[in-house]
Amino acid sequence: MEKKQKMSALQKAAVLLISLGPDTASKIYKQLTEKEVEKLTMEISSLRNVTPERKDRVVNEFHHIALAQKYITQGGLDYAKVVLEKAFGYEEASKMLKKLNASLQVRPFDFAKRADAGQILHFIQNEHPQTIALVLSYLDPEKAGQILSELPNDTQADIARRIAVMDGTSPDVIREVEEILKRKLSATVTDDYSQSGGIESIVQVLQGVDRATEKTILDTLGIQDPGLAEDIRERMFVFEDIVILDNLSIQRVIRECDSDDLMLALRVASDEVKETIFNNMSTRMAVTLQEEIELMGPVRLREIEEAQSSIVAIIRRLEDAGEIILARGGDEIIV
């Protein structure tokens, strides 16, 4: 039996990726930063003869932590404790929850996740725009988008801007807002500066609004803060999102694309994106493009990103012209 060795978090992550296999590991890599990829790659390359016992131990620990996180998300800490203790016993459940100590702090405005968008809208619509922005930045993006869509048109862009430029918020301010809005704290906020808001936050929120609301907000922001509006637009739709288009729209985009841009863009695209593109081409065109990609020599990542950005720009232009339709939260279904 292998003697247990204490492993660092990085070592455990490396062992987990090895255990999951190259296909799954590569998908995880796509979600990491370059620095994280570099650290993990170095750690994986330094591992030698990872025993089955060590793999099982790491995978088992990951599985337990994932279960604990799932139960916390579903019903909160108390619910997670009950379920985990029934499944694994008091001692094992306590260990699992202890490892998740940093994640056990209930997220501010956690009470709102059990309310529907209409209830929350009624709850906050008369508050100051900064208060509304703070609450929306903590909500599920889809729910926040629904609420933003229902707010008065003359306040939507202002609230979107406040979310985008929001930085760390003092825990005292969060406590005060929670007290005013709910009159009951759902948990003790950690004594650091909770991170909320930012461009990525408002992008996620806008993904949940209808197209008309999105256009109104971005057009208004384009006048107030052109740079911010462009930053948001660039993040609203990425090349990999092309899979959400219908076949006719994809075929329309392909006709507009430069063949070299398409070849470069697909060089590092996921199998799903490649299959989607190839399925909307003639067989001859698809075979030719695949052969050209395989024969392509080394290419700078910047060139690939520029090609993908060019295609995204085409998609945005066609959508603005009404020639293709992107599915949006709150949009009516067209048949």
Image (spheres, rainbow, N blue to C red):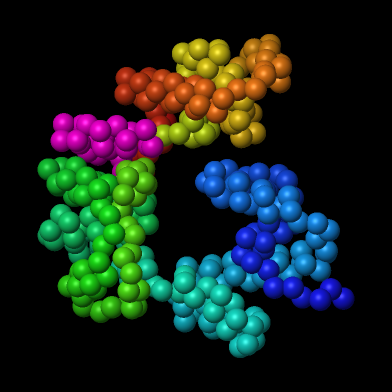
Looking at the image, residue 283 sits to the left or right of residue 98; the answer is: right
Q: Check residue 233 for magenta coloring.
A: yes
The residue most toward the right is 1
Looking at the image, residue 241 sits to the left or right of residue 53; the answer is: left
Report the number of numbered marks: 0
Looking at the image, which is closer to me, 51 or 293? 51
Q: Residue at coordinates 47% horizontally, 81% vertically from top-left?
A: 78
On the image, the x and y values in percent for residue 218 come to 24, 35
Q: Bounds of the magenta span?
A: 209-236
Looking at the image, residue 140 sits to the left or right of residue 245; the answer is: left
On the image, the x and y values in percent for residue 49 come to 83, 58
Q: Quadrant of residue 121?
A: bottom left
Looking at the image, which is closer to me, 188 or 209? 188
Looking at the rendered image, the quarter that the C terminus falls into is top left
Looking at the rendered image, the quarter that the N terminus falls into is bottom right
| Residue 8 seen in this snapshot | yes
| Residue 118 seen in this snapshot | no
Looking at the image, which is closer to me, 102 or 333? 102
Q: Quadrant of residue 140?
A: bottom left
Q: Check residue 257 for magenta coloring.
A: no
Looking at the image, which is closer to me, 62 or 148? 62
The residue most toward the bottom is 90
Q: Residue at coordinates 61% horizontally, 88% vertically from top-left?
A: 90
Q: Residue at coordinates 37% horizontally, 33% vertically from top-left?
A: 234
Our reading of the magenta stretch's main secondary structure is helix
On the image, the x and y values in percent for residue 328 come to 37, 39
Q: Residue at coordinates 71% horizontally, 44% vertically from top-left?
A: 23
Looking at the image, residue 128 sits to the left or right of residue 136; the answer is: left
On the image, the x and y values in percent for residue 55 come to 76, 64
